[in-house]
Image: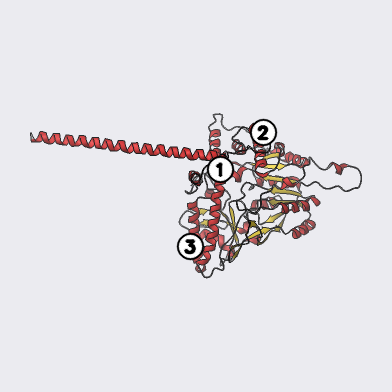
Amino acid sequence: MAKLESSIFFCQVAVASALISSAVTTFYWSRRRKKNENKKKEKEKVVTSCQDYENGSSNSNDDNNNKIHELLNFTTPIDRSGIYSVKHDLIMPPGSSSTNQATPIQMWVADMDLPLAPFIQQRLINRSKHSAGVGYTFQPLEGWTALAEWLHHHHQWTVHPDEMIFSASVVTSFANIVREFTSLGDAILVMTPLFCPLQNAITQCHRTLIRHSLTLKPSSSTINGNTNNVRHPQEQQQQYYIDFDLLQDQLDSKDIKIILLCNPHNPSGRVWTKSELQKLIQLCTERNILIVSDEIWCDWVLSWSPSQYTPLASLLPRVNGDSKQQKMEGKKKTPLTPRCITLLGPGKTWNLAGLHCSVVIIQHEETRQRYQNYAEPAFLHFGSAFATEALLSYKDDKDNKNITPSGKEYHHRGQAWLERTKHHVEENIQLLIKFCHNSSKKSTSLQPSKLQVIRPDATYLVWIDCSGMKYPSKTQALLAEKAGVILSNGNEFSPETEHFVRMNVACSKQKFVQALEQIQKVLLLEDFI
């Protein structure tokens, strides 16, 4: 009997345990399901906020904007290794060698380590799923029309789709221009410091490279009505300027055929004023010099920029070809026609450089025809299936028939992503400025600081003066070897800027802070290294 009672007791305990376990399990999964449902609803709410914001109808508050920011995940680092990224998987920039045991932090190549805009990601996924594969593709009229609408709405520039030509990249376009519009040995002027591959395109095409050194001096610009000369009591805000007297002397003495302008400027981020552009146009028109304007960064002007981006070509009179007056009889001199070729594209705007999609805009008919005659035989005016998708990234999410000529009803689904990404980059730049200023307090030898930021008007690239370092020209190598942070060396942009480095700040907050911490350790020990 005792054994029976004991068995019954243990059975009851087992049943009770099973019931309790079942209840706990049910409660757990119920809570988890509810939590997931709430998380899904919250995400849908944030997505809706994103869509409302993109469509220009958002009433969301700062809290919702912060949630949008979190949804885009600008905090957690993105692992780009193993996908054949030039920045992470190919090589480090010349002169770099990292002995830092941790994985080097790559901050040199000008692409972003941030989440891709969701609407573009979905477009690429949808295209890759097509059962017909990726055969030969052309760039449709709707893509060119979309770009024309974008330029009209964002930059008040009227461009006809017929004035646009596809190209794989800005460097490809510039090399084509150099070969078609100049002869061996001709002089081409660039304004340095400047992105190195554009300079190489001149010398490797066996033309003569003429450098106009931009002048770095204290800025007299104002931001929000406040003079921005002084960032900190002991530091002056500096920026680059064109020395027009020197430029005129160079144009008159060197027989320049082409001037290459970078607007906004890489590496300094300078946005040229309308007045500066008009002076340049006048000088070039009087001498019949072709202007090539690299405006790939046009959509990346930052909120504090004292100058609004102005497409240089938008300041030129609209003409269909060389002035008919030049063909008239008589010895009377006629004004020369200003000519400009503009290079831009979605690569920097949406972080799509790897899709190799850019655009050549030539509004001067005869100049455009010459470029097309050069590019077409080699099929340099056609892109891949995914380059087509990159071009279509300019397409509005509303029916084009609802877009007014003035652009008043224009909304773009990627606008929210672009604005939030810019805001994140601005936060990183401000953090870098504060870091460089505060670093001067860590050592009595820093007068006033070892690293001084040239605050950019545009781009996510920061040009840093390392004159305060013990060995300024070796700063890039020092930070690579001792801090494990890989930056671009200033001598890649000009022989005169070897004491500079360029930092790409378009990365997650966690990665950026880690980079600053590793740099700080080197700054404290630099005098003893």
The residues tagged by marks 3 and 2 sit, at their Cα atoms, a distance apart of 54 Å
- Pinpoint residue 406: horizontal percent, then vertical percent: 68, 38
Residue picked out by circle 2: 141
Q: Quadrant of residue 498?
A: bottom right
**First along the sequence among labels 2 and 1:** 2
The disc labelled 3 sits on which kind of residue? Lys
The disc labelled 2 sits on which kind of residue? Leu
Asked whether, in this view, residue 512 is left or right of residue 401, the answer is: left
Residue picked out by circle 3: 521
Q: Secondary structure at mark 1?
A: helix
Q: Is residue 432 visible to us here?
A: yes
**On screen, 230 above or below 374?**
below
The disc labelled 1 sits on which kind of residue? Ala
Along the line of sight, which residue is nearer the eye, 244 or 177? 244
The residues tagged by marks 2 and 1 sit, at their Cα atoms, a distance apart of 26 Å
Q: Nearer the viewer, mark 3 or mark 1?
A: 1
**First along the sequence among labels 3 and 1:** 1
Residue found at the very far top of the displayed protein? 132
**On screen, 85 above or below 514?**
above
Q: Are marks 3 and 1 in contact (CB under 8 Å)?
A: no
**First along the sequence among labels 3 and 2:** 2
Residue picked out by circle 1: 416
Q: Quadrant of residue 3?
A: top left
The residues tagged by marks 3 and 1 sit, at their Cα atoms, a distance apart of 37 Å
- Pinpoint residue 343: horizontal percent, then vertical percent: 68, 45
Q: Secondary structure at mark 3?
A: helix
Q: Is residue 493 visible to us here?
A: no
